[in-house]
Image (tube, rainbow, N blue to C red):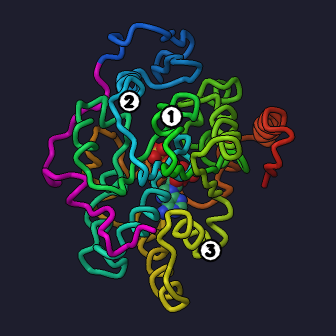
Amino acid sequence: MASPQAGPVAFKDVFPEGHDAPLVDPLPEAGHVGVDVEALPDNPTHGLRLYQGTWVPENWVGGMAQIQSGGLAARPGDVVLASPPKCGTTWLKALAFATMARAAHPPGAADHPLLRHSPHECVPFMEGFFGAGWGNKLDALPSPRLVSTHMPYSVLPDCIKRNLGCKIVCGLNVALCPKNSTTVSFSDVFELTCEGKSTCGPIWEHILGYWNAKAPTKTLVLFLRYGEMLQDTVSNVRKLAQFLRQPFSSAKEESGTAKAIVKLCSFDGLSGLEVNKTGNVGFRVRLLRQSFFRKGGAGDWANHMTPEMACRLDSVMRDKLHGLGLHFA
Ligand SMILES: Nc1ncnc2c1ncn2[C@@H]1O[C@H](COP(=O)(O)OS(=O)(=O)O)[C@@H](OP(=O)(O)O)[C@H]1O
């Protein structure tokens, strides 16, 4: 079992060249991929393309294709955070990083990386890295690596799916309450979301892919649900630590360290930091705070959506995920 003392991830390993890396648009021209990419004609502003059955921003396609074509050599200890966009990725990144790196970076430390760097800097976004030509940086990271992706299971490379020790943590907000985050953050694309044309959608396919992968494959998949995490974050961090094979060693560690991790990664804690308001996430994002820390919590959808819209989206999700045993909040 990997011990936290083995020095799993540490900030310096993620960005070896430090925080001063220039802003790089991770999205080079996708056109060079050529195959299997169709324009989404009625949504030109969002620039989504259909890539292998998934709607993705044009500038992620190149990175995805590189990962699929052998760019990434998965290793047994790799941990992949796989969540649809706007479903709690930032929080999941912070919690997983703080948990895995707790030996190198105790969560209460005054110089903890998450106080100086965005969670998106601490956990590299795979397709963005490859798209920006930084794939070799992931190669250089020591095991166990912690990376993130918005790719659905169907698009993930086989080396991750078949690697006995690879672990996937899937953040699930939408399965319980799709109207909460995705469509609020992207409220102008409500209709398209209902049709499945949302970033890395159809969103139900994203959920189904990882959900169905749990049983038959050897890949280890853990689902964490945003709503449940809001209700009892400490228990979910305990579950996460166990899944990562870095369980808290004692009740004392659990009550101290786990609670410190939760505090460090809380919405109020992270969103108030200067780095998360104006900082550099390693790639170009306009309106940083609005993108990753808009409101937090559950239920804000009611301020952005009519009851009819909410009902429609619930009904679409219920219909698509029928029989999975996933309940709606
Ligand atoms: N620490 C913490 N705790 C609880 N909730 C948090 C946290 N950090 C981010 N968020 C909320 O997550 C929403 C953004 O989703 P993502 O992080 O998945 O966005 S992204 O895909 O990485 O762009 C977005 O939700 P909304 O505010 O409803 O838009 C964020 O507020």
| In the depicted structure, whether residue 29 falls above or below residue 265 | above
Q: Point out the tag, 1 or 2, that comes first from the N-terminus.
A: 2
For the residue carrying disc 1, how many other residues have a C-alpha within 10 Å: few (<14), some (14-19), or many (20+)?
Answer: many
For the residue carrying disc 2, how many other residues have a C-alpha within 10 Å: few (<14), some (14-19), or many (20+)?
Answer: many
Say whether residue 10 is magenta.
yes
Q: Say which of 202 and 77 sits in front.
A: 77
Residue 32: image quadrant is top left
Element under disc 2: helix
In the image, is 44 to the left or to the right of 274? right
The residue identified by callout 1 is 151
Looking at the rendered structure, the kind of residue marked 1 is Met
Residue at 33% in and 75% down: 5
Instruction: Say if residue 179 shows up in the picture.
Output: no
The residue identified by callout 2 is 67
The answer to whether the residue labelled 1 contacts the one labelled 2, judged by CB atoms less than 8 Å apart, is yes
Which residues are the magenta region? 1-28
Measure the C-alpha gap from mark 3 to mark 2.
Answer: 34 Å
Q: Point out the tag, 3 or 2, that comes first from the N-terminus.
A: 2
